[in-house]
Amino acid sequence: MLQQLFTPSVQHTLELVGIFVFAISGALLAVRKNFDVFGIAVLAEVTALGGGLFRDLLIGAVPPAAFTDLGYFLTPLLATVLVFFLHPEVERIQLGVNVFDAAGLGLFCVSGTTKAYEYGLGLTASATLGLATAVGGGVLRDVLANEVPSLLRWDRDLYAVPAIVGATMVVLCIRYDVLTPVTSALAVVTAFVLRLLAMRYHWRAPRAWNRRSTAVEVQE
């Protein structure tokens, strides 16, 4: 399905760009945590490949793409080298990194959903794995860095919701037999734009109604 939207070479290039940007975010967190070079590389690899690896193992697409395409493995290492030597400069272009991260989110939630469906999963399960593909690496990154995953924190701009919207659009298109290159692209762009708007206007998910908790929020 997604192959109809892009040629294999273009799709592969887009996936590598998404992997690279996700790896940058993992490597930067490792630097902030004062990890050594091995820790930086591990966090970069996990952030970039974790979601896709989880999806492929669940749907039986083995060996996973992360182990059959050398570019998938080497791209996070390139991000590791870049951040290791130039992390102050990378931090200064964080806005640009976030824009590409949002694009990767949109691409991976759509590609993850379509791949899961092509391997025989139902619509709900496919959308769930599309979400996992897009955000799974970030969750693993935060767990390894001993942080509450950003996905679960109320004080972070919406991240999972744009991916959910993109994945849901794909399964609805499949359900009504209107999944085409145009509708696939629309799902990618919708998730991308929603993420950009969430960052621009600091949209956040609501907390519990009439919350009475006395817990003090820890600000970084």
Image: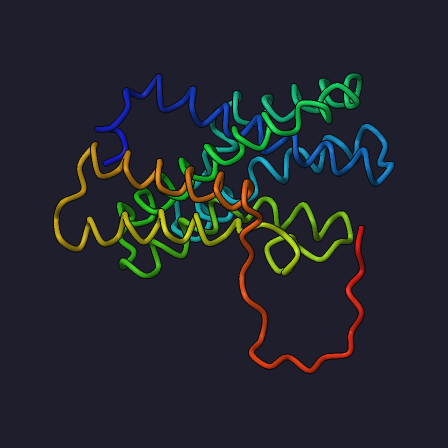
Percent x, y of residue 95: 61, 29
Number of marks: 0
Residue at the image point whose x is 21% and y is 28% from the top:
4
Q: 197 or 83, which is in the foreground? A: 197
Percent x, y of residue 185: 28, 34
Percent x, y of residue 180: 17, 37
- Give the answer, above or below, for where 170 lies relative to 98: below
Q: Is residue 173 left or right of residue 126?
A: left
Residue at the image point whose x is 43% and y is 44% from the top:
194
- Give the answer, above or below, for where 9 lies relative to 50: above
Residue at the image point whose x is 35% and y is 36% from the top:
189
What colour-coding does the image apply?
A: rainbow
| Most distant residue in the left direction | 177
Q: Which of the 4 image quarters holds residue 43?
A: top right
| Most distant residue in the front direction | 201
Tell me the quarter of the image containing the N terminus: top left
Q: Is residue 115 left or right of residue 139?
A: left
Residue at the image point whose x is 71% and y is 22% from the top:
90
Q: Is residue 25 left or right of residue 108?
A: right
Q: Is residue 116 left or right of residue 64?
A: left
Q: 73 or 155, which is in the foreground? A: 155
Q: 37 or 194, which is in the foreground? A: 194
Percent x, y of residue 13: 43, 19
